[in-house]
Image: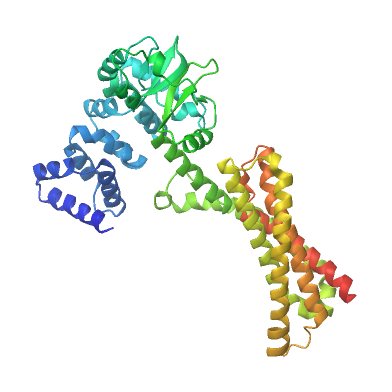
């Protein structure tokens, strides 16, 4: 982007000419996310050294430094933490929201984690340890405990006083949570407070129908709940309905991005990576890809075994061989279409295992329509192109019939396999994304060949 390139050029020009005051003033006018992106690009392009990165970060105004630090990738954060003095580290960590501090800690090596923990207060250290003890993919692991807590007996006037006193350290103040003996009993928004009378009590104006999640709920479920109800934050309660934290929409977006990336990688037969592509070594990427390639290669040997079994039939009717790639590809593509649709539905919560009969019925009808159209188009192509234009006399009407009948059955079977395997995987506790294109294609390839050879044997008497 031109804006990013201009930003990088300005930073480097002022840094190299030692116009530090101008650089500080310039950074003070920028958005933290833009600063982080520019510095990240400069580091990746090796236009900036790690020492220069530290120098530039120290020039970022204090009120922007923590926000910029959060937006940086873990490698840059590690470089900065290693270079920080204890006071600098304390200042940055002290300005971070607690959930962001936990995210940073989870990405750092043990020696830097020790430094971070030594430079936070005892209370903060206890709260960090509390969050770190939740399972990695749970709501508790992504929540923050920095929220505004009100009591039902407070007046609106008292509520505003509470918000003014504690709001500066909270991640969000728009939605306030009403508790009684730590149990979540309601919520009230700042908008509702502004429109109420000062003497009204919180208990009278709060919303008691509260949507919440449990600390052990999967973080993907939390993100889906936020998206479903269009919330900016979602309360997290323990098994006794005590409010322990909230998940904000920015964390939910990170979860959705992470989950979507993971699903895409699994659907492409790649082990999910914790690092972006350009910051992953060749060896790391090789380790992610080679296990699946080996598995799929071994499973594809069944295709070779089927061809070997029917080699006499293929030798007797050589014309059949030319249509094998088309049948296998069409079957694989048909299965992939169904699987991707179902996997996405499972991810969004639109489809459950209990819907399997409805899914099979719908995909069966879709398969018959697709198979009929594809076989009709293939029949016309075989007769006009293969037989008439190319003059291949071996391609008879019966050969065309074998190919077209096989195509209908292949598409039908492929779509059934594609729609049922992800549902079964989900029921058994596996990630449905594993049952995607490469895996299903391998299964459908073998099935399409078996159908093809048996139909040819039946109709052509091979």
| Figure check: 290 above or below 116 | below
Residue 67: x and y in percent read 28, 35
Residue placed at 9% from the left, 46% from the top? 19
Residue 310: x and y in percent read 83, 69
Which of these two is toward me, 18 or 432?
432
**Could you say which quadrant of the image residue 192 lies in?**
top left
Which of these two is toward me, 122 or 260?
260
One can see residue 108 in this view: yes
**Could you say which quadrant of the image residue 440 lies in?**
bottom right
Q: In screen coordinates, is 457 left or right of 133?
A: right
Work out which quarter of the rendered image holds the C terminus and state it.
Answer: bottom right
Residue placed at 26% from the left, 23% from the top? 168
Residue placed at 28% from the left, 58% from the top? 1
Q: In screen coordinates, is 264 left or right of 1?
A: right
| Figure check: 33 above or below 161 | below
Residue 169: x and y in percent read 29, 23
Which of these two is toward me, 374 or 100?
374
Q: In screen coordinates, is 193 left or right of 384?
A: left
């Amino acid at each position: 982007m031109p804006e990013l390139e201009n930003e990088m050029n300005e930073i480097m020009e002022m840094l190299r000419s030692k116009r530090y005051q101008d650089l500080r003033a310039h950074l003070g006018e920028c958005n933290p996310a833009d600063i982080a992106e520019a510095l990240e690009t400069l580091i990746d392009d090796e236009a900036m050294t790690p020492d220069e990165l530290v120098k530039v970060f120290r020039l970022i105004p204090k009120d922007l430094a923590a926000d910029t630090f959060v937006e940086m990738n873990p490698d840059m954060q590690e470089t900065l933490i290693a270079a920080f003095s204890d006071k600098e580290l304390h200042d940055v960590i002290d300005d971070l929201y607690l959930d962001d501090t936990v995210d940073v800690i989870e990405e750092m090596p043990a020696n830097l984690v020790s430094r971070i923990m030594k430079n936070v207060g005892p209370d903060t250290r206890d709260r960090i340890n509390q969050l770190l003890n939740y399972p990695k993919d749970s709501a508790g692991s992504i929540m923050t405990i920095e929220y505004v807590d009100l009591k039902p007996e407070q007046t609106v006037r008292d509520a505003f006083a509470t918000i003014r006193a504690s709001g500066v350290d909270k991640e969000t103040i728009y939605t306030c949570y009403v508790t009684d003996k730590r149990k979540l009993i309601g919520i009230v928004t700042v908008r509702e407070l502004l429109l109420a009378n000062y003497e009204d009590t919180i208990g009278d104006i709060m919303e008691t129908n509260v949507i919440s999640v449990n600390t052990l709920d999967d973080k993907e479920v939390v993100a889906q709940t936020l998206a479903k109800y269009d919330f900016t934050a979602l309360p997290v309660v323990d098994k006794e309905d005590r409010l322990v934290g909230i998940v904000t929409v920015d964390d939910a977006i990170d979860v959705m991005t992470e989950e979507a990336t993971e699903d895409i990688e699994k659907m492409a037969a790649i082990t999910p990576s914790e690092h972006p592509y350009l910051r992953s070594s060749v060896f790391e990427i090789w380790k992610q890809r080679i296990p699946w390639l080996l598995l799929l290669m071994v499973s594809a040997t069944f295709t070779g075994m089927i061809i070997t079994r029917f080699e006499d039939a293929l030798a007797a009717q050589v014309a059949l061989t030319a249509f094998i790639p088309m049948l296998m590809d069409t079957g694989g593509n048909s299965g992939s279409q169904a699987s991707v649709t179902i996997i996405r539905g499972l991810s969004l919560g639109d489809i459950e295992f209990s819907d399997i009969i409805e899914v099979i019925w719908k995909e069966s009808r879709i398969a018959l329509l697709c198979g009929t159209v594809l076989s009709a188009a293939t029949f016309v192509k075989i007769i006009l192109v293969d037989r008439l234009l190319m003059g291949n006399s071996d391609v008879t009407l019966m050969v065309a019939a074998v190919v077209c009948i096989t195509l209908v059955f292949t598409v039908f079977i492929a779509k059934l396999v594609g729609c049922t395997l992800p549902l079964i995987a989900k029921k058994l506790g596996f990630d449905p994304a594993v049952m995607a294109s490469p895996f299903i294609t391998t299964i459908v390839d073998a099935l399409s060949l078996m159908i093809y050879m048996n139909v040819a044997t039946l109709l052509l008497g091979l």
